Image (spheres, rainbow, N blue to C red):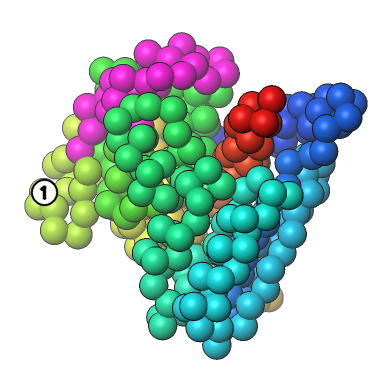
Amino acid sequence: MILDGRQTAAQIREEIAAEVSQLKQQGLRPPHLAVVIVGHNPASETYVANKEKACRQVGFDVTRIALEASVTEKELLDVVGRLNDDDSIDGFIVQLPLPEHISEEKVTRAIDYRKDVDGLHPYNVGLTALGQRSVVSATPKGIRELLARYRIPTEGKNVVIIGRSNIVGKPMAMLLMQKPYLQLPKMSASALGNATVTLCHSKTRDLKKICLGADIIIVAAGQPSLLTADMVSDGAVVIDVGINRVEDATQARGYRLVGDVDFSNVAPKCSYITPVPGGVGPMTIASLLQNTLQVYKDRLAVKS
C-alpha cells in the first residue's frame, strides 16, 4: 500500500487552515514565517517556493529574504539576529545548504531556539533526545505523523534507519526509540515510540542482513536505489527519504527524481511504502507548518 504523503499533507493543511481561521475570527493575527535563502541553488529555490505556497494555503503570513551567494557569514548572522528580535516573526528558517564559506553550525546556533521551526537548534535537539516537548526536526516529525495517520505502530518493532544525518537519521532514531510524550491523531502515544532502532551508515557491515530483520526501514542516505528487493522482508514498511536526480533523456527536463529505494522491485514486497516524489517531501513541509503554528501559540501563551 502506498503511503500517500501528498494526501496526508493536504489533510494537515486543512486542519491548520481551520485553526488559523478561528484565530483570525478571535481578532488575532496569523502566524508569520520568514524564509532565508542564500544563492540560487535550483533545488533550494524549489523547496522555498513550495514552503511559501503552503504557508499561503493555510493563511500564514510569509516573508522571503533572498541573499546572494556572495553574502558574508557576518552579514547572514546579522539577518538572523534581526529576525530573532523581530516580534512580528514567529519562526524562521535558513534554507540549507549554505555556501561553503558560511558555517551552517554557526548559523543554526545563532537562531533563537524559540523561533527554530526547523528543529535544528541544539536546544531543541537536546529536548527531543530527552523525550521532552520540543520543536521536532521537520522531516522526522513528518514521517512520524505519516505512520500515525496510517495507523502503523512502532512499539516493539525492529526499525532500521539508513543514514545518520543530524537532519533525519539521528532525530528519527531518537523519536522512535523513546517513550513518547504526546498523542498524535489516529494513534495512541505508546504505539508511536518504544521501537528497537538500529542506525546504519556507510561503515555498517552486513547491511543486507540487518535490513532483512527489520519491520520498518527508513532510508535517508542520498544514494539512488540503495535499498534493493533482496534487502527487504515480506510485509516490511519502507520509508524513502531520498530524493535524487538521475539522467533521463525521455524527460523534457533531462532527468527524473528517484529515491534511495529501488521502488519498482521493492514495493511488491512491502505492506506500506512511500513514493518519490509524493511521500516524505510533502510531509516535511506540513511539519514545518505545524512547527510554525506551535511556536506561534507558545509566543501567545507567554504574552497572555
Let me know if residue 180 is in the magenta part.
yes
Q: Where residue 117 sits in the image (x, y, percent)?
A: 55, 46
Q: Is residue 4 left or right of residue 229?
A: right
Mark 1: give few (<14), some (14-19) or many (20+) Cα within 10 Å. Answer: few
Where does the magenta region start and end?
Answer: 175-198
Let me know if residue 301 is in the magenta part.
no
Mark 1 lies on residue:
206
Residue at 56% of width from left, 47% of height from top? Answer: 115
Residue nearer the viewer, 191 or 180: 180
Q: Amino acid at mark 1?
A: Asp
Residue at 26% of width from left, 18% of height from top? Answer: 156
Q: Quadrant of residue 255?
A: bottom right
Residue nearer the viewer, 263 or 140: 140
Q: Where residue 233 sits in the image (x, y, percent)?
A: 27, 33
Check the image and report above or below for 253 versus 295: below
Residue at 73% of width from left, 41% of height from top? Answer: 31
Q: Is residue 180 left or right of residue 207?
A: right
Q: Where residue 285 sits in the image (x, y, percent)?
A: 61, 47
Q: Quadrant of residue 221?
A: bottom left
Element class at badge 1: loop
Residue at 49% of width from left, 16% of height from top? Answer: 183
Residue 102 visible here:
yes
Q: Residue furthest left?
A: 205
Residue 21 visible here:
no
Check the image and report above or below for 185 versus 23: above
Q: Quadrant of residue 254?
A: bottom right
Q: Is residue 148 left or right of residue 297?
A: left
Q: Where residue 144 sits in the image (x, y, percent)?
A: 46, 31
Residue nearer the viewer, 250 or 18: 18
